[in-house]
Amino acid sequence: MARHTTNNTMTMKNLISAILASAILGTAALSTGCTGSATRESTGEYIDNRAITAKVKTALVEDELVRARDVEVTTFKGTVQLSGFVDTQAQKDRATVVARTVPGVNDVKNDLIVK
């Protein structure tokens, strides 16, 4: 029975990942503007950054140490910013490690607060 629960958990995580990716890509398709600047993303950057955000969030959900529901993820020009709250310094450090493993991440700014 435990195996059945594990399969359901993984299926649910895959479903959540697919929904997040679809929502992000759908929103990106509605955005306007093509050229980026130092403070504004181009359409391509917007799509890339939203995909990176979804992948980082998914990686955090799948990580056993980090409590992903308490971690907010935003991405701008390949730099991922983590914010929110964690219970331990180990969770904060692990969130940085997990985020850096995602393809497309150039840098990670960890603003997580240890409760």
Image (tube, rainbow, N blue to C red):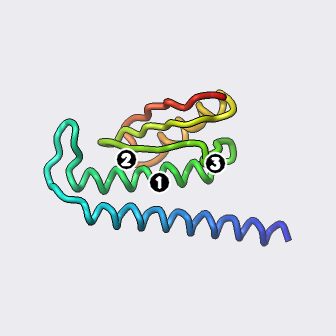
| Nearest the eye: 84 or 5 | 84
Asked whether disc 1 touches disc 2, contact meaning CB atoms under 8 Å apart, the reply is: yes
As measured in the structure, the alpha-carbon distance from the residue carrying label 1 to the one carrying label 3 is 12 Å
Residue at 63% x, 28% y: name it: 114
Judge whether 77 appears above or below 34 on screen.
Answer: above
Residue under pointer 1: 55
Secondary structure beneath label 2: loop
Disc 3 marks a residue whose amino acid type is: Asp
Q: Residue at x 43, y 63 (%)?
A: 21
Q: Residue 47: x and y, percent?
A: 30, 57
Q: Tell me if 105 is positioned left or right of 60 in this view.
A: left
Tag 3 residue: 63
Residue type highlighted by circle 2: Gly
Q: Which residue is the site of mark 2?
A: 104
Q: Calculate the distance from the C-alpha at mark 1 to the C-alpha at mark 2.
A: 10 Å
Quarter of the figure with residue 40:
top left
Location of the C terminus by quadrant is top right
